[in-house]
Image (cartoon, rainbow, N blue to C red):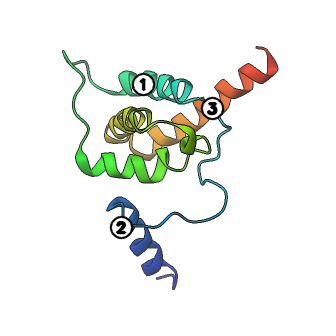
Amino acid sequence: MDAEEPRAREWVTELVREQAPPRPGRPALAVPRQSAAQVIDVARRLAVAAVPRVRRRPDPVPELLRVARALVVDEHPSAPGWSAAERAELADWVALLIEHRGEDGVQHLVSALNAAANVRTDGR
């Protein structure tokens, strides 16, 4: 076992419990700055494609909602400028994406956010 592994697990556990203090430095999510509406739109599109067809959107699993908030929403470089309602809506969609696609869902979200930003800057 890596000597850092117990500390890393403890830190992730604190994040999920929403008890970890903010850490200085760059956000961990490697995506460009974007409006909440843009990010929510991408997350919603991916989550809707991932969720089996149901009559209404399912509620996200509470544990996954905390993971989505701590490891995705709060780590977006634009998150400090978003409202609490925008952050909550994005967390719902990301939690559903994680529930149905796991880590791959988060990777697809990151790729889609980067692609969307490239389209805007390249004019494509």
Q: Secondary structure at mark 2?
A: helix
Q: CA distance from mark 1 to mark 2?
A: 26 Å
Q: Looking at the rendered structure, which numbered label has been put on residue 44?
A: 1
Q: Is residue 109 left or right of residue 16?
A: right
Residue for point 31% across, 48% down: 64
- Residue 94, compared with residue 123, is above or below; it is below
Say whether marks 3 and 1 touch (CB < 8 Å).
no
Say whether marks 1 and 2 touch (CB < 8 Å).
no
Whole-percent x and y of residue 57? 25, 23
Q: CA distance from mark 2 to mark 3?
A: 28 Å
* Residue underneath mark 2: 13
Q: Looking at the rendered structure, which numbered label has been put on residue 34?
A: 3
Q: Secondary structure at mark 1?
A: helix
Whole-percent x and y of residue 115? 66, 28
Q: Is residue 23 left or right of residue 47?
A: right
Classify residue 100 by image quadrant.
Answer: top left
Q: CA distance from mark 3 to mark 1?
A: 15 Å
Q: Secondary structure at mark 3?
A: loop
Q: Tell me which amino acid carries mark 2.
A: Thr
Q: Is residue 101 left or right of residue 79?
A: left
Q: Tell me which amino acid carries mark 1.
A: Arg
- Depth check: give the residue in front, 84 or 76: 84
Of the residues under marks 3 and 1, which one precedes in the sequence? 3
Classify residue 20 by image quadrant.
Answer: bottom left
- Residue 90, compared with residue 10, is above or below; it is above
Q: Quadrant of the C terminus?
A: top right
Q: Tell me which amino acid carries mark 3.
A: Gln
